[in-house]
Image (cartoon, rainbow, N blue to C red):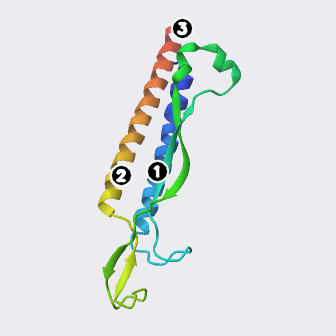
Amino acid sequence: MDFFSSMRVSASGLDAQMKRMNTISSNIANAETTRSPDGGPYKRKDPLLAAQTDRENFGEILQNKLDEHVQGVQVVDIVEDTRAPRMVYNPSHPDANADGYVAMPNVNTVEEMANMISAQRSYEANVTSLNAAKSMAQKALEIGR
């Protein structure tokens, strides 16, 4: 794998983890939202990640057989969680039903914080990988002097 391929793979990981962190932040911010534009409580969202090939043009495909299986990552879609909303007893809430229960978002803040830590660590790993590739490229240039 050449320097540019490794940098592109790391950059795709950075982009995916940033979108993941933004989605998690949105989930945490809406953990108490009982009214959404769609009607009903906010529904938790998750980014759907998929592998993408690291080929930019046809010349790169023919150039190196070693890079044949190098893949980055991309966010394909943001999907809503299908779990049912939490029912919380609060008869004084304006969105309470006849029995006094309020449909709350299916967001678990502990789960979201664990996901945020995972996304942050993945982001840091991609930054480290990118910096290592950059450092190797700089050292290679210094050899030529």
10 Å crowding of disc 3: few (<14), some (14-19), many (20+) = few
Q: Which mark is residue 144?
A: 3
Q: Residue at x 70, y 22 (%)?
A: 58
**Sequence-first tag of 2 and 1:** 1
Which residue is nearer to you in this view: 145 or 72?
A: 72
Q: Secondary structure at mark 1?
A: helix
Label 1 amino acid? Answer: Arg
Q: Residue furthest right?
A: 58
Q: Is residue 96 above or below residue 104?
A: below
- Graded by Cα atoms within 10 Å as few (under 14), some (14 to 19) or many (20 or more), the crowding at tag 1 reads many
Q: Which comes before the other along the chain, label 3 or label 1?
A: 1
Q: Secondary structure at mark 3?
A: loop
Q: CA distance from mark 2 to mark 1?
A: 9 Å
72 above or below 110?
above
Q: What's the amino acid at mark 3?
A: Gly
Q: SS of the residue at dot 2?
A: helix
- Residue type for callout 2: Asn
Inter-mark Cα distance, 3 to 1: 41 Å
Of mark 3 and mark 2, the one earlier in the sequence is 2
Residue 57: where, in percent of width, then height? 69, 25
Give the residue drawn at x 52%, y 40%.
Answer: 50
Q: Nearer the viewer, mark 3 or mark 2?
A: 2
What's the mark number on residue 115? 2
- How far apart are the alpha carbons under marks 3 and 2? 44 Å
The foreground one among 83 and 45 is: 83
Closest to the observer, 132 or 80: 80
Indicate left or right for 125 with 140 as reference.
left
Q: Examine the image and state in which quarter residue 94 appears.
A: bottom left
Q: Which mark is residue 20?
A: 1
